[in-house]
Amino acid sequence: MMTRMNRNGAETCRLSVVVPCFNEAEVLPAFYERTVAVLRDAVGEDYEIVLVNDGSRDRSWQVIGELAERDPHIVGINLSRNFGHQLALTAGLDYANGDLVLILDADLQDPPELLPRMMALIDEGADVVYGQRTERFGETRFKVAMTRGFYRLLGKIANVDIPLDAGDFRLMRRCVVDALNDMPEQQRFVRGMVAWLGFTQVPLPYQRPARAAGKSKYSLVRLIRLALDGITSFSVWPLRLALLAGAAFCLIALLLLIYALIGWALHSSPPGWASTMVAITLVGGMQLICVGLLSEYLGRVYMEVKRRPHFIVREVRARQRRRDTIDGRAAE
């Protein structure tokens, strides 16, 4: 049988599963058991699971190492620090060698049992099959409302058609993963980047269950940061909004000026009040809004031009079947 090779000359498998992990020691054993059972039914032994430890502070890396020692299908990638979910995901996609690549979270909120349905849609001609959440269990109403609101806002202002209520849970063909890995930006919003690539993308509606163990690593601050990455990566509307805000403040200043002049004519306002209020409202408001938005975009340009690597790999754990390929890539 002919050995399949990817464009980097590495031996490929039928399916790679990429799993970013941050403090997931509690759930990793259950994740492993459920996912392996699904993979064996779907593709036999022709698969790999790439577990990326994103600077966990618990025993996640020890658990990943133990799994890699006993199962040759496991590839453990230990990053040098916490780079964040999107960059840990990027690291996993870079190391994945499958003809198909499935992105999963270790918390089992994205059920691996949906894989056969995803593969059926791939066989029907899809290049990307993404999970689209119809319900979200185990999350607060506030978080659900914020997430739904963000996706709808992004859908209105983005210059790319980014699917509503879809996270990173998706199955992709090799050609899509290669194109995604070629995209060099530092501030990565993977679900938006995949949408930007095009290809044939098909939704798979599903109900998202609660976490199998542990607690969510996406705090409100992290969610806001991810939302900013998504908005500033795929829309210039905030800059246009600054222009509209400036126009609005000019209108407010004009109304205040008229009000102040009427007060001056009726001798009902103190001397100097009109000019002070108009200057503060007009200049201060416009500067704060416009400079803040420009700084956000300029900061992202600054991060891009430094051309730092997306991630640093500290250690790789894998059995001999992929040792040569992984050692060479980790040394790059």
Image (cartoon, rainbow, N blue to C red):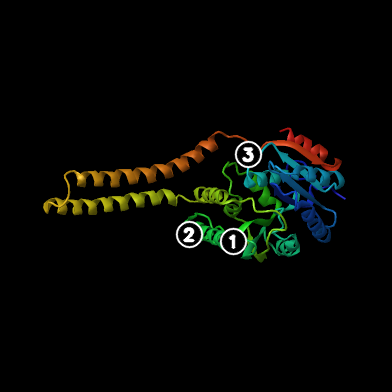
- Would you call the spot at circle 1 few (<14 residues within 10 Å), some (14-19), or many (20 or more)? few
Q: Distance of mark 1 from mark 3, alpha carbons? A: 32 Å
For badge 3, the amino acid type reads: His
Q: Is residue 282 left or right of residue 189?
A: left
- Would you call the spot at circle 2 few (<14 residues within 10 Å), some (14-19), or many (20 or more)? some
Q: Earlier in the sequence, mark 1 or mark 3?
A: 1
Nearest to the observer: residue 58 or residue 201 = 58
Residue 176 x/y as whole percent:
66, 51
For badge 2, the amino acid type reads: Lys
- Image disc number at residue 156: 2
Residue 77 x/y as whole percent:
74, 41
Decide if residue 314 is in sight here: yes
Instruction: Single out the mark in the foreground, 2 or 1.
Output: 1
Tell me which corner region of the image, top left, top right, bottom left or bottom right, holds residue 259.
bottom left
Looking at the image, which residue is at 64% across and 50% down? 217
Check whether the beta carbons of the residues at disc 1 and disc 3 lie within 8 A of each other.
no
Residue behind mark 3: 310
Residue behind mark 1: 140
For badge 1, the amino acid type reads: Thr
